[in-house]
């Protein structure tokens, strides 16, 4: 699979419009005219972009009523509900891709969520902040306190993050669960990280599928 | 925007029951301009006691339409872009054939000889009007309450004719509680001696029964909070109870006023027939499940409910949404925050406008 399938102008645009490196990667991964479910879709910016540029059929789940309203006002089919219970209605393999962008660390039961995602989707795209980044390690080592960095800016008591994982953790997890990593991307800001991702990448994006029998 | 109700007559309509009404008159209004491709038509379906006058100012009575805050230039259903159509339902009393219409076979009003009608019959008659206007596909069908039931029926019965479906504050079938409230209304009418087995045309109408029915209805349209806010325990004149059975409380006075006002514009027999049609309506009828019924639909759905609506609670909207999702259908759902109870779909203009205007624009773009 070529990672350069999206034409350059499109990639530049998605960065300009969405301003998030992981969104740009997702824009590259998703095949045209596919069915996409975005969990924790916020105001539906990514889905709108995918609908406009990849002619996808999009659906989203978002817990905040305000954000659901904004997403629907963009014409995106978003359902107000939480991720942990929001997938149960969907039949098996209803989507080509199920996206979980930067919220895996906020779900109460990540394994349950990922399994559900792999049930309703043929492929899963997961983006998460890497807790193994050197700045996080450094902050913890030097301060002796729960690390606070640009990527993890919260105090321990008001952080929405409840699970902290590194790139190595996720890789091991996939092996353990018998999931196939089809592609991965490591980012620092909007730049690709080529070496030592567990130290140098702030965000990891994985394209995962269940192993076929 | 001055508007005039139009009408069209069809030779006959065959009902779900097999009965035939011939001929059948239909009252409707249109706003905006139908484009050359006839691809910008939006059908608004009205609630129980609504009528074809959904928007603009009536040419004869000078009154605004029942959803005028949502339909018009620049509004949620923007008449600068869309051709908006609203049709009085079958069984009604505002221009479309109903129990108060003259039965040509007898020369007298149908009264209780009017055949039983269903939500499906209402929709089939609307389809005849849409066909009559040469529209093969509606950009959207939208409506609240009983209007929402018709939206669902449209989407299932005519899947290729509905690009987007907006069922608002509605249900796929009435609960026992909803049937119960309607039954109280019907019994109030039928207990009024003036009802006279439905044969009151040309005589005194069952005004007391009909107004009590309407009073009960109004209670169910409001929320406890909105009634507290609007009336509280306030007295109408003095600051204390005079211990009479006059309408001393503001809430009593309001309900009586609304009840009496209703009698002037609504026919008691239409009340009976239409509430029965609502109670009997079950979208899943003829299918093994609601999900299998909704599987027939191919529209983009936007389902809206309101937090304080206890007559058509969000649970019922969620049942629809869940069934659609289980069949992998395209559905957006939002529960809007409101204190106004079931009335919210008529009152909460701002947020509904944002949702509908944006969603509809997208559907229009995709359909183009």
Image (cartoon, rainbow, N blue to C red):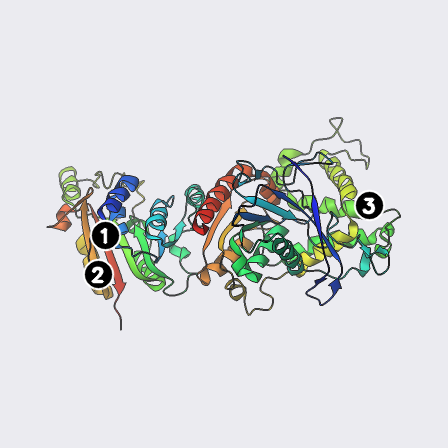
Per the image, the residue denoted by label 1 is A205
Q: Residue furthest bottom?
A: A213
Q: Is residue A49 above or below residue B292?
A: above
Per the image, the residue denoted by label 3 is B208
The verdict on a common chain for dots 2 and 1 is: yes
- Circle 1 chain: A
Find the distance from the CA under tag 3 to the CA under tag 1.
69 Å
Counting from the top left corner in percent of width and height, residue B307 is at 54, 45
- Residue drawn at x 69%, y 40% as measured from the top left: B4
The verdict on a common chain for dots 3 and 2 is: no
| SS for callout 2 | strand
Per the image, the residue denoted by label 2 is A181
Name the foreground residue: A129 vs B26. B26
Horizontal arrangement in the rendering, residue B320 relative to residue B239 (left or right): left
Is residue B134 shown to the viewer in this render? yes
Q: Quadrant of residue A191 in the image? A: top left
- Count residues near mark 1 (Cα–Cα under 10 Å), then give few for <14, some for 14-19, many for 20+: many
Q: Quadrant of the N terminus of chain B?
A: top right
Counting from the top left corner in percent of width and height, residue B223 is at 62, 42
- Circle 2 chain: A
């Amino acid at each position: 699979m070529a990672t350069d399938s999206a034409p350059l102008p499109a990639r530049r645009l998605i960065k300009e419009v969405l301003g998030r490196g992981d969104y740009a990667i997702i824009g590259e991964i998703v095949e045209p005219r596919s069915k996409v479910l975005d969990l924790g879709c916020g105001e539906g910016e990514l889905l709108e972009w995918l609908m406009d540029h990849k002619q996808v059929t999009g659906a989203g789940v978002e817990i905040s009523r305000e954000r659901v309203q904004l997403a629907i006002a963009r014409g995106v089919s978003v359902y107000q509900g939480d991720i942990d219970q929001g997938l149960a209605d969907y039949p098996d393999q209803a989507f080509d891709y199920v996206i979980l962008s930067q919220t895996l660390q906020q779900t109460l039961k990540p394994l349950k969520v990922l399994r559900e995602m792999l049930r309703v989707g043929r492929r899963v795209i997961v983006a998460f902040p890497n807790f193994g980044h050197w700045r996080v390690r450094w902050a913890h080592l030097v301060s002796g306190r729960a690390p606070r960095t640009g990527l993890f800016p919260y105090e321990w008591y008001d952080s929405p993050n409840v699970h902290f994982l590194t790139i190595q953790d996720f890789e091991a997890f996939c092996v353990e669960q018998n999931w196939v990593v089809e592609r991965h991307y490591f980012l620092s800001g909007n730049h690709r990280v080529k070496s030592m991702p567990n130290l140098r990448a702030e965000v990891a994006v994985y394209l995962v599928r269940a192993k076929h029998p | 925007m001055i508007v005039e109700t139009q009408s069209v007559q069809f030779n006959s309509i065959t009902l779900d029951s097999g009965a035939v009404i011939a001929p059948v008159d239909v009252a409707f209004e249109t706003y905006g301009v139908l484009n050359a491709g006839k691809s910008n038509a939006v059908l608004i379906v009205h609630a129980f006691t609504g009528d074809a006058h959904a928007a603009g100012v009536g040419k004869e009575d000078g009154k605004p339409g029942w959803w005028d805050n949502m339909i018009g230039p620049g509004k949620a259903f923007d008449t600068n872009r869309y051709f908006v159509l609203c049709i009085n339902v079958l069984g009604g009393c505002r221009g479309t054939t109903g129990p108060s219409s003259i039965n040509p076979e007898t020369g007298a009003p149908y009264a209780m000889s009017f055949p039983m009608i269903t939500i499906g019959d209402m929709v089939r008659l609307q389809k005849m009007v849409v066909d009559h206007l040469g529209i093969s596909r509606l950009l959207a069908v939208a409506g609240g309450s009983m209007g929402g039931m018709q939206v669902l029926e449209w989407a299932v019965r005519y899947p290729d004719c509905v690009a987007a479906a907006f069922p608002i504050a509605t249900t796929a079938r009435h609960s026992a509680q909803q049937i119960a409230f309607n039954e109280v209304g019907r019994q109030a009418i039928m207990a009024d001696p003036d009802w006279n087995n439905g044969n009151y045309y040309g005589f005194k109408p069952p005004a007391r029964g009909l107004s009590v029915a309407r009073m009960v209805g109004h209670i169910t349209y409001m929320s406890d909070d909105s009634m507290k806010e609007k009336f509280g325990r306030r007295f109408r004149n003095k600051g204390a109870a005079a211990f009479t059975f006059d309408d001393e409380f503001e809430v009593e006075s309001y309900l009586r006023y609304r009840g009496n006002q209703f009698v002037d514009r609504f026919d008691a027999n239409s009340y009976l027939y239409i509430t029965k049609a609502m109670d009997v309506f079950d979208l899943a009828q003829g299918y093994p499940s609601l999900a299998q019924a909704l599987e027939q639909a191919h529209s983009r759905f936007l389902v809206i409910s309101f937090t304080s609506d206890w007559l058509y609670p969000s649970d019922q909207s969620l049942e629809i949404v869940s069934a659609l999702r289980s069949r992998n259908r395209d559905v957006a759902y939002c529960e809007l925050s409101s204190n106004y109870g079931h009335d919210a779909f008529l009152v909460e203009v701002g947020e509904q406008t944002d949702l509908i205007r944006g969603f509809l624009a997208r559907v229009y773009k995709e359909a183009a």
